[in-house]
Amino acid sequence: MRRPLQVTLLVLSGLGLLHASLFTDLCLRYVKPSMRPMLVVSGFLLILLGIAEAWSRSRQTPGVDDHHTGQGHIGENHIDQHHTELPEEHTGHNHSKVPRVAWLLFLPALSLLFYAPPALGAYTASRAATKAVPVQDAFDRLPATSPLPITLTDFTTRVQQDRKRAIKGRTVQLTGFVTPDKGSTYWDLTRIMISCCAADAQSIKVRVYGIPALAANTWVTITGTWHASGTLGTSSARAALNGVTVEKVAKPVNAYQDALPFATSR
């Protein structure tokens, strides 16, 4: 690839990273917040490399490239005169053309600047591995608040492992996005969790009964009670909810965390 294109690619990539990690929250669609500083540093480094490359080229002695190019042609002409039947690779290499595949390197940089891919949603959740429920022996006493704000992870863990069955009969409130199940009378309230980046995504779901599903990827806060299925407090119990009310909410900035329900929009 020619140097001007290398410089352009370095600078665009750096600007794309800074746009996603420093000036906006786009990076949270792809990585954990703890990785944000590294992306910012990487963006600045790419821009500095591009500037250094441009400055290095501007300080080159004029005519140096032409001199070397002339020597290359002389050598090639000499070979052609005496060995006209030699294969093309023995007559020199032409580095002036940019390989077509190199142009694809511009797409990631431009996409971060002008059209960043969205965060993972219902399509991924319906195919991603289910996050394992952490083993827990002791549980804190639940507050008397009703409805009780609770995360999907805590709800699932209590349903399947709390032998005191403290969740029984309690009206709970959970927040997540809608993952429809075509042809079914139920749907899944979902959160996607990541360990490092979107590539290792896992989903956690609570099945919802009694309320029609909204459009896929709609963020909602749902209120309801545990839907009896299996034996509460054992692994046979299903993390499911008899929905009573559902309200649309704004999508959180960081969608890859199983947070408590937040204020609903009216």
Image (cartoon, rainbow, N blue to C red):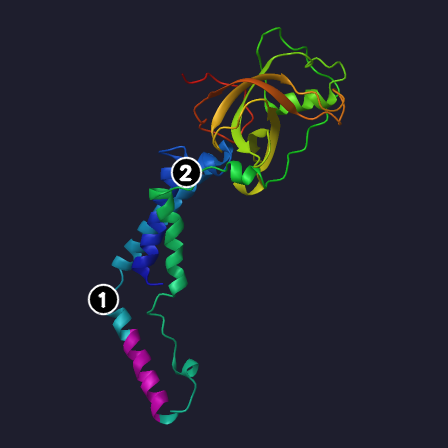
Q: Which residue is mark 2?
A: 40
Q: Is residue 105 left or right of residue 64?
A: right
Q: Which residue is mark 1?
A: 62
The residue positioned farthest toward the left in the image shown = 62
**Which amino acid lies under the numbered mark 2 shown in the image of this protein?**
Val
- Residue drawn 27% across and 69% down? 64
Classify 97 as above or below 6: below
Q: Is residue 200 left or right of residue 38?
A: right
- Give the quadrant of residue 96: bottom left
Closer to the camera in the image, 111 or 144: 144
Q: Position of residue 231 (x, y in %)?
A: 76, 22
Classify 63 as above or below 54: below
Q: Residues within 10 Å of mark 1 (few under 14, many from 20)?
A: few
**Magenta span: helix, strand or loop, mainly?**
helix
Element marked by disc 1:
loop
Q: Is residue 6 left or right of residue 164?
A: left
Q: Tell me the tag on residue 258.
A: none
Q: Is residue 3 visible?
A: yes
- Residue drawn 63% across and 39% down? 129
**Which amino acid lies under the numbered mark 1 shown in the image of this protein?**
Pro
Q: Is residue 37 visible?
A: no
First in sequence: mark 2 vs mark 1: 2
Closer to the camera in the image, 200 or 159: 159
Element marked by disc 2:
helix
Q: Which residues are magenta?
A: 68-81
Marks 2 and 1, how far apart at CA: 36 Å
Q: Quadrant of the C terminus?
A: top left
